[in-house]
């Protein structure tokens, strides 16, 4: 019985009258619209407007929309500060928030509007838990900025700090670049984490292809958001729950998308977490196996020259899906939320004349190897190398060990790291950080100083999607939980072999046993609250850093 007709729900009805709802509207299906708007960053700045457009679509299709909000943390604004510890934690809080609202208000269907990095996996995780008919709406990328006759993104900003440190840029030039790098609302403007995860949402089947690609400020976004409201209503009519969409085959396609578009290392964490929430078995090595088979077909920053807006103009993820389908790399027996098949998506894609952003699989932009999963004596439970389609390599070098990101950044900026070093940054893992900070300040400084290819960085923390260079993150077990990375000392030899997928600490077993006996986890001095709760419950990065 609807809330409009149930005698016992009269008190609840009184609040709906207070909000201006009619009895007719109360009898309609209620679609919750979860917005991850915050006014603290450009990434999600359009979400209120989009929520209003989704609500119009819901009404157009005969439903009653109800909007609500979650928190969201800006990765860029918190980068290199203690605030970055909140970023990955926010994924769990956002997922929990949407789940709680869904459980409390018993929506018939849901739309999750997502944007900045953690909000995308968080929305998907919540939908997997609630399992009501649902659609993901990615709010869209920022347009690139223009500076000195070239397109620039936030990546250029971070690398400018390294260039300033070695005297290749003046502070006044860095400041001028800062005024031009980010011209308006939207997520970071290339194949960094947010756009990588938007592709994941498409290829999982939860977001309609062709919507997430549209930049945040493009005129087309408003009508696309209205359509998403209608798609949610149609999904409800068809009884299309996320459990029918999130299958092993859909997960495979999502992994292929990350590999084919040169995606962010964070996708590894988030795919593992999404699989966990959906009850699908997924081991970290399977992501590595997919990356070994799938070449990179898009030339997107940070490993190519193009931006997310370029991908949209070229034909978007629909065009990528077509390329992957024709090469037989996707599994076709999947369900897409808007009712199309992957073949229809590919047929609907419009390839721009002469576009150079999306290649064919037979003539890829780069060979297979966007990411690689390594194991070895330094990472028995695995870690992630951002290979970026580069040639396989073997690297041996002396360890330079830092127990926090800030110490490492200061050493790099003062010239304390040399070519050939293997920089170790530890106690930055999910539990040890806590919160597994991203090391963009470090990778930006290394690249900016021209050390991106000659210094390797190994950490139990993680990386921004903007990061590139010889970077290995998510080392597990993490230092705080007694992983071998805690035992590394300055000058130890570390060996990386990308083809063999190994990461080893070349120190005799007896010496490691001696160090293990002497090792103690550092005291974290955590205050009560969300961070200490997180540290107590978070699992390994190789399990997606989920909290249950
Ligand atoms: Fe929000 Fe990059 S900081 S998408």
Image (cartoon, grey):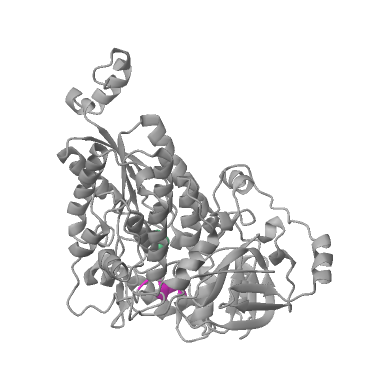
**74 with respect to 411 (left or right):** left
Between 359 and 357, the one lying in front of the other is 359
Q: Where is residue 221, by image quadrant?
A: bottom left
55 shown above or below 18: below
Residue at horizontal 28%, vertical 38%? 239
Q: Nearer the viewer, residue 76 or 288?
A: 288
Residue 544 relative to residue 407: left or right: left
Placement of the N terminus among the 4 image quadrants: top left
In this rendering, position of residue 170 left or right of residue 225: right
Q: Residue at x 45, y 83 (%)?
A: 170
Ligand 1's quadrant is bottom left
Q: Position of residue 249 (x, y in %)?
A: 39, 55
Magenta segment = 153-158
Q: Position of residue 529 (x, y in %)?
A: 59, 42
Residue reaching furthest to the left = 60
Q: Quadrant of the C terminus?
A: top right
Q: Position of residue 281 (x, y in %)?
A: 51, 51
Res 514 seen here: yes
Image point (29%, 16%), residue name: 10
Q: Is residue 536 left or right of residue 202?
A: right
Considering the whole magenta stretch, tell me its main secondary structure: helix
Quadrant housing residue 257: bottom left
Frontmost residue, 307 versus 269? 269
């Amino acid at each position: 019985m609807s809330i409009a007709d149930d005698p016992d729900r009269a008190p609840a009805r009184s609040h709906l009258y207070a909000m201006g709802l009619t009895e007719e509207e109360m009898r309609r299906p209620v679609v919750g619209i979860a917005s991850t708007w915050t006014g603290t960053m450009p990434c999600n700045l359009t979400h209120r407007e989009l929520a209003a457009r989704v609500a119009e679509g819901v009404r157009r299709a005969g439903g009653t929309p109800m909007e609500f909000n979650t928190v969201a943390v800006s990765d860029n604004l918190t980068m290199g500060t203690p605030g970055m510890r909140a970023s990955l934690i926010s994924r769990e809080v956002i997922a929990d928030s949407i789940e709680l609202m869904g459980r409390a208000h018993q929506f018939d269907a849901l739309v999750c509007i997502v944007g900045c990095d953690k909000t995308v996996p968080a929305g998907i995780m919540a939908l997997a838990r609630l399992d009501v008919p649902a659609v993901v709406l990615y709010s869209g990328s920022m347009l690139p900025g223009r500076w000195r006759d070239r397109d620039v993104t936030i990546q250029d900003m971070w690398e400018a700090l390294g260039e300033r440190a070695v005297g290749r840029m003046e502070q006044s030039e860095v400041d001028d670049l800062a005024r031009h790098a980010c011209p308006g609302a939207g997520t970071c403007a290339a194949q960094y984490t947010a756009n990588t995860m938007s592709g994941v949402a498409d290829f999982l089947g939860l977001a309609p292809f062709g919507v997430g690609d549209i930049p945040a400020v493009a005129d087309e976004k408003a009508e696309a958001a209205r359509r998403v409201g209608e798609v949610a209503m149609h999904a409800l009519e068809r009884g299309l729950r996320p459990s029918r969409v999130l299958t092993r085959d859909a997960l495979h396609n999502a992994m292929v998308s990350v590999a084919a578009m040169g995606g962010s290392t964070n996708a590894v964490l988030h795919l593992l977490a999404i699989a966990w929430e959906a009850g699908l078995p997924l081991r970290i090595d399977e992501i590595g196996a997919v990356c070994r088979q799938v070449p990179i077909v898009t030339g997107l920053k940070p490993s190519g020259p193009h931006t997310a807006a370029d991908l949209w103009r070229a034909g978007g993820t629909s065009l990528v899906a077509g390329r992957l389908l024709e090469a037989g790399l996707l599994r076709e027996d999947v369900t897409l939320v808007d009712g199309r098949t992957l073949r229809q998506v590919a047929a609907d894609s419009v390839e721009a004349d002469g576009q150079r952003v999306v290649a064919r699989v037979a003539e890829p932009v780069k060979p297979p190897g966007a990411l690689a999963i390594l194991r070895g004596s330094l990472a028995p439970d695995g870690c992630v190398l951002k290979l970026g389609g580069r040639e396989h390599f073997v690297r041996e070098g002396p360890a330079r060990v830092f127990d926090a990101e800030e110490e490492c950044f200061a050493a790099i900026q003062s010239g304390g790291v040399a070519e050939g070093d293997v920089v170790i940054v530890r106690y930055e893992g999910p539990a040890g950080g806590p919160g597994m900070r991203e090391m963009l300040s470090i990778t930006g400084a290394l690249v900016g100083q021209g050390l991106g290819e000659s210094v390797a960085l190994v950490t139990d923390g993680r990386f921004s999607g903007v990061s590139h260079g010889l970077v290995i993150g998510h080392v597990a077990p993490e230092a705080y939980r007694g992983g071998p990375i805690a035992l590394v000392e300055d000058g130890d030899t570390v060996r990386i072999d990308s083809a063999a997928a190994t990461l080893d600490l070349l120190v005799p077993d007896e010496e490691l046993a001696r160090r293990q006996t002497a090792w103690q986890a550092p005291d974290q001095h955590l205050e009560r609250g969300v961070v200490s709760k997180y540290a107590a419950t978070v699992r390994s990065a190789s399990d997606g850093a989920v909290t249950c």
